[in-house]
Amino acid sequence: MSAAKAVIRYEDFARLDLRVAQVVDARPHPNADRLLVLLVDVGELGQRQIVAGIREHYDPQQLIGTQIVVLVNLEEALIRGEESQGMLLAADSAGQPVLLRPESPCPPGSVVK
């Protein structure tokens, strides 16, 4: 278990735009063994592509149609030649990622508070 990070102000946390997203498509990254490329629907914000290091733990086809929590206002990045327009949230459970998901279905784009 890692140590807690430095305390931040509420205003810092409030700058994060966390939303519920529906996975529309998922495929292995063509240039990286550990990455998946996800296309997610974020409601009124449209669709976004997210590159995530979860390939060893999740079957891309089983992710399609599921809901996850994503950070949508993260600066875009080019990851091994694929554009990533956000970041999914996952917990670390004994070195394995566990995707954060809503307890019950939510409209895509729902704000996480």
Image: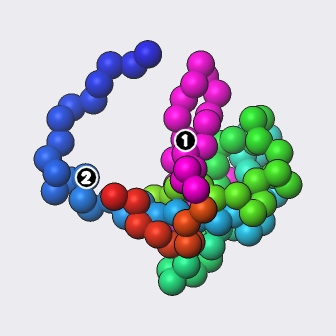
The three-letter amino acid code for the residue at tag 2 is: Phe
Residue 88 seen in render: no
Give the left or right position of residue 24, taking residue 91 as reference.
Answer: right
| x, y percent for residue 112 | 40, 60
Per the image, the residue denoted by label 2 is 13
In magenta stretch: residue 82:
yes
| x, y percent for residue 43 | 55, 78
Task: Look at 52% across and 63% down and name the residue there.
Answer: 20
Per the image, the residue denoted by label 1 is 90
Work out which quarter of the rendered image holds the N terminus and state it: top left
In magenta stretch: residue 16:
no
The one of 36 and 94 positioned closer to us in this rendering: 94
Which structural element holds mark 1? strand
Task: Look at 41% across and 67% down and name the residue there.
Answer: 111
Work out which quarter of the rendered image holds the C terminus and state it: bottom left
Question: If you read the primary sequence from the N terminus, does the residue marked by circle 1 or circle 2 appear first?
Answer: 2
| Magenta highlight range | 80-104
Snapshot quadrant of residue 38 = bottom right
The three-letter amino acid code for the residue at tag 1 is: Ala
Give the left or right position of residue 25, taking residue 93 as reference.
Answer: right
| x, y percent for residue 100 | 55, 45
- Circle 2 packing at 10 Å, graded few (<14), some (14-19), many (20+), is few
Which structural element holds mark 2? helix
| x, y percent for residue 71 | 45, 59
Task: Look at 82% across and 51% down and name the residue there.
Answer: 62
The one of 85 and 18 positioned closer to us in this rendering: 18
Q: In the displayed structure, would residue 38 be above or below residue 9?
A: below
Snapshot quadrant of residue 26 = bottom right
Snapshot quadrant of residue 11 = bottom left
Numbered circle sitting on residue 52: none
